[in-house]
Amino acid sequence: MTPEDLCRRYLDALNTSDLVGVRALFTPDAEIVSPLYGVRPAHDFYAELFADTTRSKTTLLNVFDSSAERQSVALHFHYVRTLASGKVVEFECVDVFDLAEDRQRFTRMTIIYDTAPLKADFEATRNQI
């Protein structure tokens, strides 16, 4: 599987809230660096994300694959997310993935986007749960 295939499977798992499917894309010790959730083990992060989200719709914009020596890939996409509160948030996002040595799973993901317009809704939703 190519890194682009991994990224497409990742977006498919986000769109369907497929916890098992998304976890299978990461190594057991993988971690996520998120501007809203902080640094979390990947397996915990997605359980929290899916609990906080009732619907996700992503649109792939670009996949940037580094050379094999760098072992990373970046995914640029448009994200429409319905929070558990019912509030719909929409933004562009870049996820930077570090790849396992065989380039078949992710070992780390860093999420990059402007949280300013989303932070109040996110915090309100988290306080209701």
Image: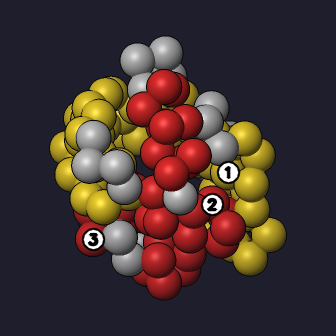
**Rendered residue at 54%/80% (across/down):** 24
Regarding mark 1 in the picture, which secondary structure is present there?
strand
Q: Which of marks 3 and 2 is nearer the N terminus?
A: 3
Q: Is residue 65 above or below residue 104?
A: above
Q: Where is residue 33 in the image (x, y as percent from the top left)?
A: 69, 42
Q: Is residue 5 left or right of residue 123?
A: left
**Rendered residue at 26%/32% (across/down):** 90
- Tag 1 near tag 2, CB within 8 Å: yes
- Work out which residue is located at the far bottom of the displayed protein and give it: 20
What whole-number distance in Å separates the C-alpha atoms at marks 1 and 2?
7 Å
- How would you rate the neighbour count of disc 3 (Cα within 10 Å): few for under 14, some for 14-19, many for 20 or more? some
Which residue matches tag 3? 16
Q: Where is residue 80 in the image (x, y as percent from the top left)?
A: 24, 41
Q: Which of marks 1 and 2 is nearer the N terminus?
A: 1
- How would you rate the neighbour count of disc 2 (Cα within 10 Å): few for under 14, some for 14-19, many for 20 or more? some
The disc label shown at residue 45, or none: 2
Picture quarter with the N terminus: bottom left
Could you tell me the amino acid type at mark 2? Phe
What whole-number distance in Å separates the C-alpha atoms at marks 3 and 1?
19 Å
- How would you rate the neighbour count of disc 1 (Cα within 10 Å): few for under 14, some for 14-19, many for 20 or more? many
Q: Nearer the viewer, residue 125 or 7?
A: 125
Q: In this view, does 30 lie to the left or right of 16?
A: right
**Rendered residue at 46%/57% (across/down):** 52
Q: Which of 1 and 52 is in front in this view?
A: 52
Which residue matches tag 1? 32
